[in-house]
Image: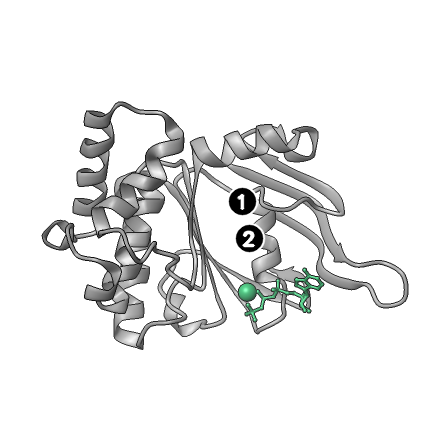
Amino acid sequence: MMYELRAVSKTYGNGAAPVHAVRDVDLHVDEGELVAIAGPSGSGKTTLLQLLGALDRATSGDVMFEGRELSSLGDAALTQLRLETMGFVFQQFNLIPTLTAAQNVEAALAPVGLDVDERRRRTAAALQSVGLTHRSDHLPSQLSGGEQQRVAIGRAVANSPRVLLADEPTGNLDSETGREIVELLASFAHEGAQTVVIVTHDLELVSRAPRIVRMHDGRINGN
Ligand SMILES: Nc1ncnc2c1ncn2[C@@H]1O[C@H](COP(=O)(O)OP(=O)(O)OP(=O)(O)O)[C@@H](O)[C@H]1O
Ligand SMILES: [Mg+2]
């Protein structure tokens, strides 16, 4: 079991107008599973993904990751956990504009503390896994949107994370390119046996995902 959430809630603010972004969510995610989380804007998808990514803490309930209760870990331990086990992909590609595709991937490996050769090897492997070896020396401005997102995915998988978390990864792409990006993300659940969670408001985009979790008003249905 990769994730087990029990009665997880996240409330923003307190006092007069608290926002119940995630309400009483129970969710299991197995290792190697591909899960799409779909729901309308404001339904709590990003908030839930941030809890899965240990980027934020639940207000109540338990978030278990690989058998560990995340609320029992301090900030430094959570940072280390993210670095070693999680890869993130966002709607904004967040590439550094002055670095090439390869340098963007390599920069993300810097905190891992590898020697130069190993860093280069992993960078090349990551770019190959997203089909961008031939664009390694291009700057982001010299890449299409879909290619930039591929670099961002390469960056996310370069350290072989056990879980890949993507928040609206196709939000800035046309529908055909978006489909390709979803297929690429899904391929990591097949080939690398990585756990992949994709959040989107576009149900049609993920209609072929083996498991779709629907979110509405902070709650999930059918889990
Ligand atoms: N930092 C915050 N402080 C207060 N309220 C917040 C905060 N972040 C999100 N919210 C509120 O929590 C609710 C859920 O937001 P969230 O971003 O999780 O939705 P979402 O499903 O990702 O929406 P979208 O599809 O538009 O990205 C919304 O009502 C939002 O306004
Ligand atoms: Mg969101």
Q: Residue at x 21, y 58 (%)?
A: 139
Q: Quadrant of residue 109?
A: top left
- The outermost residue toward the front is 98
- The outermost residue toward the bottom is 174
Which residue corresponds to mark 2?
A: 49
Residue 1 shows up from this direction: no
Secondary element at tag 1: loop
Q: Is mark 2 within 8 Å of ligand 1?
A: yes
Marks 2 & 1, CB-CB < 8 Å contact: yes
Q: Is residue 113 above or below residue 19?
A: above
Where is residue 52? Give x, y as percent.
Answer: 56, 45
Q: Residue at x 33, y 72 (%)?
A: 173
The kind of residue tagged 2 is Leu
Q: Is mark 1 within 8 Å of ligand 1?
A: no
Secondary element at tag 2: helix
Give the total number of marks visible in the rendering: 2
Query: Could you say which is closer to the camera, residue 110 or residue 81?
Result: 110
Residue 121 - label: none
Which residue corresponds to mark 1?
A: 53
- Report the side of 155 relative to 37 (left or right): left
Dot 1: few (<14), some (14–19), or many (≥20) neighbours within 10 Å? many
Where is residue 219? Give x, y as percent.
Answer: 67, 61
- Report the side of 219 relative to 166 (left or right): right
- Report the side of 186 relative to 218 (left or right): left
Query: Could you say which is closer to the camera, residue 136 or residue 174?
Result: 136
Where is residue 223? Give x, y as percent.
Answer: 60, 54
State ligand 1's quadrant: bottom right
Q: Residue at x 32, y 40 (%)?
A: 107
Q: Could you give the CA–CA distance between mark 2 and mark 1, rounded to whole angstroms? A: 6 Å
Dot 2: few (<14), some (14–19), or many (≥20) neighbours within 10 Å? many
Q: Residue at x 28, y 68 (%)?
A: 145
The kind of residue tagged 1 is Gly
